[in-house]
Image: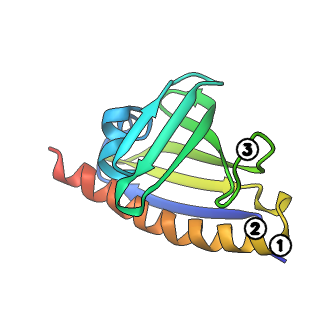
Amino acid sequence: MVGDRIEREIVLRHPVERVWAALTTAEGLSQWFGSVAEVELRPGGRAYFRWEDLDQETVATVAVVDPPYRFAFRWPIEGWVGDDAPMTLVTFTLEPVGDGTRLRLVESEFTQAADDVARSAHEANSQGWTVELGDLENYLDAVV
């Protein structure tokens, strides 16, 4: 049985508004989450991500926009294409803490796919989020 969710939590040394911009703007996203990003910041809006070094791209649908505390999107489980592809829900929740921001990431709904597909996607995304959140922290720390 595959776990249904990935959870990560980090505390960043930056105000909520700055972290929000890094998560929800094309300019911010393209600095840490892939190499190209587009986002229509509204529920039902389209988000596009491309990782040129991996020759991968994906299209997501914005699910929640609650500035500056919660942003969520749905994207297809890796390896699936087409309108009937199972989708996971990626949710970022921001909370001010001291001089910084606690960021909680949850990606859920893996178990709607077949076990082997869900297991592979869960493992890949689990490793991916560790790297991507490190890239987010590095990006925010580099931009003063």
Q: Helix, strand or loop at disc 1?
A: helix
Q: CA distance from mark 1 to mark 2?
A: 5 Å
- Pick whichever of labels 3 and 2 is earlier in the sequence: 3
Q: CA distance from mark 1 to mark 3?
A: 19 Å
- Residue 95 horizontal/vertical position (percent): 49, 43
Mark 3 surroundings: few (<14), some (14-19) or many (≥20) residues within 10 A: few
Q: CA distance from mark 3 to mark 2?
A: 17 Å
Q: Quadrant of residue 125?
A: bottom right
Q: Nearer the viewer, residue 102 or 59?
A: 59
Q: Helix, strand or loop at disc 3?
A: loop
Q: Is residue 78 visible?
A: yes
Amino acid marked by disc 1: Asp
According to the image, label 2 marks what residue?
118
Question: Viewer-nearest of labels 3 and 2?
Answer: 3
- Residue 21 horizontal/vertical position (percent): 36, 34
According to the image, label 1 marks what residue?
115
Quarter containing the N terminus:
bottom right
Mark 2 surroundings: few (<14), some (14-19) or many (≥20) residues within 10 A: many
According to the image, label 3 marks what residue?
82
